[in-house]
Image (cartoon, rainbow, N blue to C red):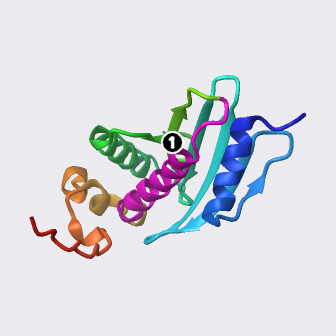
Amino acid sequence: MAASALFSTVKSTFEREGWAFSEIDGREVVTCGFEAHHTRVTLHVQVFAQMGAVSVVSESSQTTSEPMQRDRLAELVLRVNHTLTVGAFELEWDSGRVMFRTTNLFATPEGDADIIAGLVHNTVGEMDRISPMESLIHQATGPELAGIDIAELMQRTDLLPDVPELPQHQA
């Protein structure tokens, strides 16, 4: 079976960006990993050619079977999702694994390489952004875990990477 035009665009986008990837045999899916600021982000990109859709999903490497940790992760996912305009976090309940998913529908069969690259950047960035908060929840137990204020945790600027200031433009 020949690859769809949309899958060909996904692969050429990864090649253009210099991103190493592997294809999943028999499916229009690529997998890859990125070294982000806080963590290694593993993701897969799946093409649904008949719908003209590309879905990019990253998965946390951390899991938990501890009910209280899972509850706190669920609250974190819900609160973070409230702040998003593109994509959404999910919690795989049984494994306690956090995922981030973003999908785009394209009007043309070949899609748009810049939008695909943007979906990948967004997915890596969002998983990296939530990683330190997720880690704090995974490391906490008992009263410490119960005492984590998720809304307050989300406001911590010490968990964000330093971003250099852009030069101001003179008018």
Q: Does residue 161 appear to the left or right of 106 in the view shown?
A: left
- Mark 1 falls on what kind of element? strand
Number of residues whose C-alpha sits closer than 10 Å to that of mark 1, classed few (under 14), some (14–19) or many (20 or more): many
Task: State the residue position of label 1.
Answer: 101
Observer able to see residue 134: no
Position of 56 compared to 110: left or right?
left
Q: Residue at x 38, y 57 (%)?
A: 130
Q: Residue at x 38, y 65 (%)?
A: 132
Q: Is residue 6 above or below residue 124?
A: above
x, y (%) of residue 26?
Answer: 86, 40
Does the segment drawn in magenta span residue 23? no
Q: Quadrant of residue 137?
A: bottom left
Q: Position of residue 127 (x, y in %)?
A: 45, 56
Please determine whether, in this image, residue 89 is positioned above or below residue 129.
above
Q: Residue furthest left?
A: 171
Residue 156, given in percent of the width and then of the height, sits at 21, 64
Image position of 167 (left or right of 76): left
In the foreground, 45 or 15: 15
Work out which quarter of the rendered image holds the C terminus and state it. bottom left
The three-letter amino acid code for the residue at tag 1 is: Arg
Can you say whether 88 is above or below 124 in the image? above
Secondary structure mostly seen in magenta is helix
- Number of numbered labels in the structure image: 1
Front-most of residues 120 and 148: 120
User: Residue 43 at x, y = what percent?
Assistant: 61, 53
Q: Residue at x 21, y 54 (%)?
A: 149
Q: Is residue 35 left or right of residue 133?
A: right
In the image, the segment drawn in magenta is: 109-137
User: In the rendered image, which quarter contains the N terminus?
Assistant: top right
